[in-house]
Amino acid sequence: MVRAPSTSGSSQGLFDLDLEGAIELIKKSGARTVGVQVPEGLKRIASDLAGEIEEKTGCEVIVSGDPCYGACDVDLDLCRAADLVIHVGHSEMLEGDPLSDKVVYVEARMRADVREAIEGAADDLLSARRVGVVTTVQHVHKLAEILEVLKGRGIEGVVRPGGRTRYPGQVLGCNYEAARNADVDTYLFVGTGQFHPLGVALATGKRVIAADPVTGNFSVIDTAQILKRRYGAIARAIDAERIAVIVSKKPGQRRMELARRMISLGMERGKRMVLVYLDRMEPDALVNLGVDAAVSTACPRIALDDQAKYPVPVLTPPEFEVLLGGRKGDYLLDEIE
Amino acid sequence: MVRAPSTSGSSQGLFDLDLEGAIELIKKSGARTVGVQVPEGLKRIASDLAGEIEEKTGCEVIVSGDPCYGACDVDLDLCRAADLVIHVGHSEMLEGDPLSDKVVYVEARMRADVREAIEGAADDLLSARRVGVVTTVQHVHKLAEILEVLKGRGIEGVVRPGGRTRYPGQVLGCNYEAARNADVDTYLFVGTGQFHPLGVALATGKRVIAADPVTGNFSVIDTAQILKRRYGAIARAIDAERIAVIVSKKPGQRRMELARRMISLGMERGKRMVLVYLDRMEPDALVNLGVDAAVSTACPRIALDDQAKYPVPVLTPPEFEVLLGGRKGDYLLDEIE
């Protein structure tokens, strides 16, 4: 493990990256051109990484300049241009494009101490003697320690395998398989931000406590606001006549068959449906197309987290089924399996 | 020729598209899935076009949702997903990716009357009895009429073949070959906006009069402001230590060898150079990479027209050579041949 090069004012100083392992792999592979893809939060280290790889391997290095937020978003054009691609910060996704065989995943492990936030949350957890434990790839190496801290407070932590995730207990913005079948009423999410624990709460309908190892704080996730906004978006789409169904070009988000099913459902109800293929979902795309609403089969979080940016309602596939009257019952989070 | 479907408030009512021809081609090709790519200014007709093609051919239609500003930007992912792609509004570019063999180009012909603007400009032109005539693909069908109007005022119009353009007299934002070797001191540009005639003036160093067939007005192009801004950008890049060299993924903008030459030049002068491959050049890309300046081998107009959007100087390759002291003399516009 080497420490990621530290540059001023950004967060990568908190992470360990196994760059040495990647450099060994590059040397063994005989690659002459190496691609480097880094997520937005770590982008500032990209040119240092490129310099280090060039220096230690003699390869030409090409950095991916497009935004990247997950392993769903491997830069396939970079895979075409390079012999090998180093993808930093995300764990491997099991399916994908054959081109992604060229990808070497270098995960980023956060060094933050998980103990303080979990100790703080434990009092709230104590009413549940058994809790499901989930986290993101940045903290999966801390799972044993998390279970131990819980045990010290008399709480049994349950870790379940995930779906398209690489590690047990690991969740993604689009996949909460690891937060299922745990037979618990409460989940403990360890990690930063509200993005993932909100997904856990929506996916399971259970109580979720988020413990943040960077701040040392914890919070109980409230889904009321987001559910209100989602039902609001569905309601605003009722009169939509012209509806775009979005399919992402990103290899881990490309759900063409699901999109075709949405097109059929809409047409059966007399809607004017248009199938739209794009790399990056953006407000301008919908403005320029002149549609009244969109159903996004791309990243499920676009509709949930970014609706305010869009001029028209953007629904997930299950929300679109609610709109058309074909689905009843509890709110169903869109996940990519 | 069929009239483009007219929808409210947008400009496509001014254009004729030969959609019938494209539909015949689709039927003959045996295609089952057809892609449709439309530039931003005509995007609103995309879903109507898709509906018409579906109805008349029985094919599934997929619309490209990413921005498109030229034939340099054929959607290769759409080419991979569809059997045939209808690319609207631009003329074919002669080089490109093998995938672009799937593309059928449907040009948009503007119906606007060119006579009024040229008659108005003629008084200014009269000092030159011989002028070079250039235009964009939307007006190339009017070239004979343009020459006739000029002749009526005693002016000889000279039309020269272009480079990567399909028609004599046609210019692109990145190519002014048709404005060379005309042995004239003045060019008449017929078309809308300042984007193309500014390019003619920078590429030739000659006087350029732009006649706008939509407004009926004409203007004489002044390059002083843009040249001042460009030399300002070069001056601001003098102390840059870390410099990104941008290569575009777009098939008609991908200049990897030129980028490699820029990397070498910069390294010889002790700069820290990083090679960046991206689909869409945007301010955030440079902010996140933390570079002090960029050299863009993508669309030459990014540096010229959009510099104000960027937090750091963005130079064209010839401007970078000026910065490094390797090039003297008149301002040299970056063009893609």
Image (tube, coloured by chain):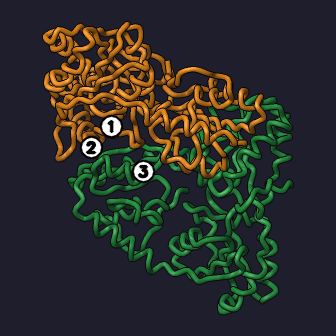
Chain colours: A green, B orange
What chain is tagged by disc 2? B
Residue A140 in picture, x, y percent from top left: 74, 65
Real-space Cα distance between discs 2 and 1? 16 Å
Label 3 with label 1: CB-CB less than 8 Å:
no
Of B285 and B131, which appears nearest the observer?
B131
Calculate the distance from the C-alpha at mark 3 to the C-alpha at mark 2.
25 Å
Please report the residue visible at 63 percent of the width from the left and 78 percent of the height from the top. Answer: A210
Q: Are marks 3 and 2 on the same chain?
A: no
Residue B79 makes an appearance in the image: yes
Which label is found at residue B44? 2
Image-quadrant location for residue A277: top left
Q: Residue at x 37, y 56 (%)?
A: A295
Name the kind of residue labelled 3 in the image. Answer: Leu
Query: Looking at the picture, does residue B24 appear above or below residue A331?
Result: above
Of labels 2 and 1, earlier in sequence is: 2
Residue tagged 1: B61
Percent x, y of residue B252: 49, 25
Where residue A166 appears, as percent x and y from the top left, is 69, 56
Circle 3 residues within 10 Å: few <14, some 14–19, many ≥20? some
Given the image, what chain letter belongs to the residue carrying mark 3? A
Label 3 belongs to which residue?
A258
Q: The disc labelled 2 sits on which kind of residue?
A: Arg
